[in-house]
Image (spheres, rainbow, N blue to C red):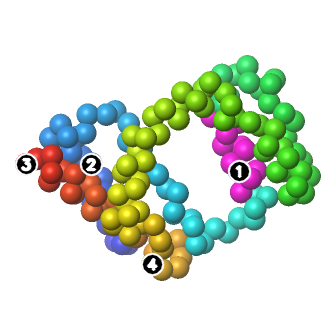
């Protein structure tokens, strides 16, 4: 069994126990993976922008199909400046949908702050995606165990 499999198993088990004990009452779990690729991102800036724009369009279209006609035409050239210009035209942050969703951001930011400032998740301690996933899993596991213990007392 690989280390990452073991950590995934541990995290799954802690979440299951927390659900059984009534500590987690939500039907959804939010995971922030901001740092998971920070030192080993194999994508070029152009590829990153394209992927993020694709993800944005996917979320918007799944919420409201009528946005397909309102979105700007995708950049098909391999030019970073054109892709930046395309991303600027998306201006998704000005929509009511985005503004409504950002009202709930504070709910997870406190958890992210604890991971970063208390449990060392703000800086990668080693290179490679597997090592970073291990660091993230250990930090999240620690926070989950602390939370379970605190809520059980």
User: Among all residues in the image, which is located at the extreme bottom?
Assistant: 126
Contact between labelled residues 4 and 2, with CB atoms less than 8 Å apart: no
| Relative to 28, residue 144 above or below | below
Which residue position holds label 1? 51
How far across and down, in percent of the image, does residue 132 sit?
A: 47, 71
In the rendered image, is residue 71 in sight? yes
**Stretch in magenta:** 48-59
Which residue position holds label 4? 125
Dot 4 lies on which element? loop
Image point (75%, 65%), residue name: 44
| Relative to 114, residue 89 above or below | above
Contact between labelled residues 3 and 2, with CB atoms less than 8 Å apart: no
Contact between labelled residues 3 and 4, with CB atoms less than 8 Å apart: no
Image point (53%, 71%), residue name: 129
Q: Quadrant of residue 42?
A: bottom right
Mark 2 or mark 1: name the one nearer the start of the chain.
2
Q: CA distance from mark 4 to mark 3?
A: 33 Å
Mark 2 or mark 3: name the one nearer the start of the chain.
2
- Near mark 2 (Cα within 10 A), the count class, few <14, some 14-19 or many ≥20, is some
- Near mark 1 (Cα within 10 A), the count class, few <14, some 14-19 or many ≥20, is few
Image point (71%, 43%), residue name: 54
User: Quick one: 138 or 122, which is closer to the camera?
Assistant: 122
Q: Which mark is on residue 146?
A: none
Mark 2 or mark 4: name the one nearer the start of the chain.
2
Position of 135 with respect to 6 (left or right) is right
Mark 4 or mark 3: name the one nearer the start of the chain.
4
Q: Which mark is on residue 153?
A: 3
Dot 3 lies on which element? loop
Which residue position holds label 2? 15
Q: CA distance from mark 2 to mark 3?
A: 17 Å
User: Quick one: 114 or 137, which is closer to the camera?
Assistant: 114
Q: CA distance from mark 2 to mark 4?
A: 26 Å
């Amino acid at each position: 069994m690989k280390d990452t499999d073991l950590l995934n198993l541990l995290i799954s088990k802690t979440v299951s126990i927390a659900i059984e004990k009534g500590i987690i009452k939500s039907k959804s779990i939010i995971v922030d993976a901001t740092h998971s690729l920070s030192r080993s991102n194999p994508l070029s800036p152009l590829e990153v922008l394209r992927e993020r724009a694709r993800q944005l369009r996917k979320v918007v279209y799944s919420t409201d199909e009528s946005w397909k006609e309102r979105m700007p035409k995708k950049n098909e050239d391999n030019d970073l400046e054109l892709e930046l210009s395309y991303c600027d035209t998306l201006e998704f942050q000005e929509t009511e949908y985005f503004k409504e969703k950002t009202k709930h951001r504070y709910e997870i930011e406190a958890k992210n702050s604890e991971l970063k400032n208390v449990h060392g998740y703000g800086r990668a301690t080693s290179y490679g995606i597997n090592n970073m996933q291990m660091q993230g899993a250990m930090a999240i596991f620690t926070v989950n165990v602390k939370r379970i213990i605190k809520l059980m007392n």
